[in-house]
Image (cartoon, rainbow, N blue to C red):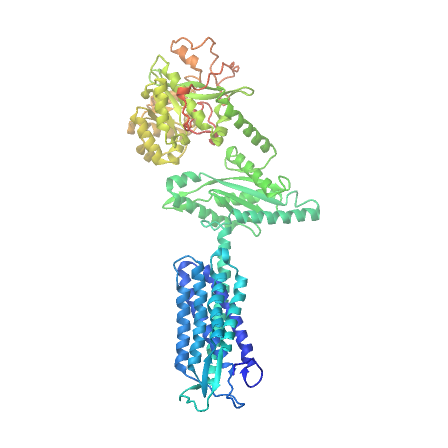
Amino acid sequence: MTAEITGAEDGFHLAFLAGTLAYVALTALAISRFLIRMAHEPRERRRLWQTLVGATVGIMAWSTGMLIVLGHRWSDGQGGQATVGFDVAPLALALALAIGLCVAVFNAGLEGERSVVQAISMGSGSGAAGLAVYLLALEAMHAPGRFQFDPLLGGVAAGFALGAFGYASLLLHGPERMIRRRRGVILIQVSILGMTGFAAQAIEFAPDPDAAVPAGLVDGGSLGFMVGAISALCAAITFLFSRIDLASARAEEEKFRHLALHDPLTGLPNRAFLAQALERMLEEARGRTEADGIGHGGATLAVVGVDLDRFKPINDVQGHAAGDAVLQGIAQRVRAALAPGEVFARAGGDEFVALKFPCAREEAERFARRLHDAIVVPIDWAGSSLGVGASLGIALHPRDGEDAGALLTRVDLALYRAKKEAGGEIVFYDRRMDEASRDRSALAMELRQALARGEFELRYQPQTSLGDGAVIAYEALIRWRHPERGLLAPDAFIPVAESTGLIRDIGAWVLHAACREAAAWIEPVGVAVNVAPVQLAQSDFVELVRDALLASGLEAGRLELEVTEASMIADHEQLRAVMIELKAIGVRVAMDDYGAGYASLAALRSFPFDKIKIDRGFVESLGRDPQSLAIVRSTLLLGRALSIPVLAEGISSEDGLRFLREEGCTEGQGFLFGRPIEAEAVRRRMGMAPAGPAASPPPDAGASDPPPAASAPAPAPPAPGAIPPQGERASGPAVGFPRSEAAPAPAASRIAG
């Protein structure tokens, strides 16, 4: 008689059916979750999860098959139930086979990428294990009669075992484009029930009272207890690992969320966190403003931009490990100084942004000062004390902007002003900063046309021998003959040229024009040209210098290029290589503005300088500042020890000249010997005929040159032409500009010191 699902004595017992359905549903849900988790595990942990999932699937397949078998009620043909016994050996073999096969299938292709074949094989293998368990269970059953198997219904069960299980696994564990997890979970449950249901219907029992039943069999009740215990253990383990998996997934999610919103080096919030926090605070600030009508003291939110000063020299000279230690120390101190509700985020590099809400103007200033004080505390690193400064710019909501973009833009403007003019102080945004920014943009557009229109001019300031007063060289200094603003000194336009990249073309023009003019002099004096760090970084800079010498006919030994220690800090090895190549062709190299920064004895030993130029700030303060006197004196001693000539810049008084001569200084430059003059004036000094009919105007002091006495402005000479074709290079001209010998320019507007 074919087994039937009934509530009577024969057929399938409904209690077993309900229990089997519940067991299948719970374990299928847990396994489907394991499959999803397994697909996203890192390679080194995936084997553990695949082994766990394989063993769980194997136990579930065995338990489900046994529950189906135990749920049957076999008729003895006489109105009663046939007594069925079970051989334990085949059942144990079935359990081992199910676990082993599923573990092997799930670990197959572990090292490869997920594929359609691999996913289907995992599912079909699990289904085959379940079907094998059912067949071995039949082999283990013994009763007075014969058990027969219907091939047609068995084939349908095999189809569920191989096809439906395989497709379910593909939806759960296949290539990303085919993943449909919800459908996969449903299909795996249907597959289990379909396979076991059709397999149960395929079994027929023919009673035979004369059939012998082996001794030593386990009765259905005892086997049911054993299967129940194993099923309960499997369910408990599955539930436990499911909970562990859920907790692990949440911890992993929180870890990735923290990494996505925080800087890995300092642990501070990053740009993404900052954007979210700023929008959240703006929403709250707008709500408060609407509620009380006036906001919080006129400003509900403060945005503070922070830029570190003197950080790059630490990073470049001491190494990135030292720079990282400085950043980590800043992060630690600032975190300790923050109050609840305040945010301090690293925007990138040595830039930070802080938020405070609610915050009035006075509170914003105190907040910024608190940040500044925490930042500038030095740290101990490898026996050295490393410290940085900080410039801070502040914008307030709603006064300075209503949205995040406007506030951050205005913070940048305030920060730019703080770095350029306030010397690392705290600057609030002012509407006039927008006007200055527009002026810089307009100036940048005009600069693009100035070179083509020949609006740049050179002035030449003499460098003099302090022994006999003879001129030994001239330093080339640039001016811009602006059509509306008049004659502009470098401080007015060089910072804009640097920020736009136009400094490359301007620097190339200066180099070619200075060499061309010096080649025409009848006296074999030298010409000095300042070189910017970005110029030295160009791979073809030496070739550009060689081209300028060849095009002009100037002897290489008459050209002196002046570099500052900023060039050394930018790239030690590149500068050394460039200097060696320059000296190989005969060009001289001088260290400009020595003493104004971080120059060291090691730098003078490492680089083959031909001259040291003492910064004008120390020379101008001789007689007033004992420290300046000590620095000048020690530099002169150093030059003599290293056999390097020393030139003092900024000589403007007889007393200063007398001191320098007494200390053994041999060369000088400054207003005492002459202001920057035009090329025609240099020619006249040499007794040469003028280059053109136009009369030469008086010497030019320039917009930033501090005159020793009041004088009338110089008349405007005709603008010279642009660089001739043979003097230009189309492929990335070098960057450089000559700075004025007059008053020192702000740090932000000087390339060569």
Identify the image quadrant of the C terminus. top left
Of residue 305 and residue 254, the one placed in the foreground of this image is 254
Q: Residue at x 42, y 69 (%)?
A: 102
Total numbered circles: 0
Where does the image place residue 67, in percent across and percent down from the top left?
A: 49, 78
Instruction: Answer above or below: position of 548 versus 522.
Output: below
Where does the image place residue 373, in percent across and percent down from the top left?
A: 50, 44
Query: Could one spot residue 245 in this view of the protein?
Result: no
- Quadrant of residue 530 within the rendered picture: top left
Where does the image place residue 148, in percent across and percent down from the top left?
A: 46, 81
- Quadrant of residue 367 within the rendered picture: top right
Of residue 553 and residue 298, the one placed in the foreground of this image is 553
In the image: residue 663, left or right of residue 220: left
Where does the image place residue 528, in percent across and percent down from the top left?
A: 38, 22
Instruction: Answer above or below: position of 606 versus 53.
Output: above
Q: Residue at x 59, y 33 (%)?
A: 434
Q: Residue at x 35, y 36 (%)?
A: 572
Instruction: Answer above or below: position of 23 versus 599.
Output: below
The outermost residue toward the front is 152
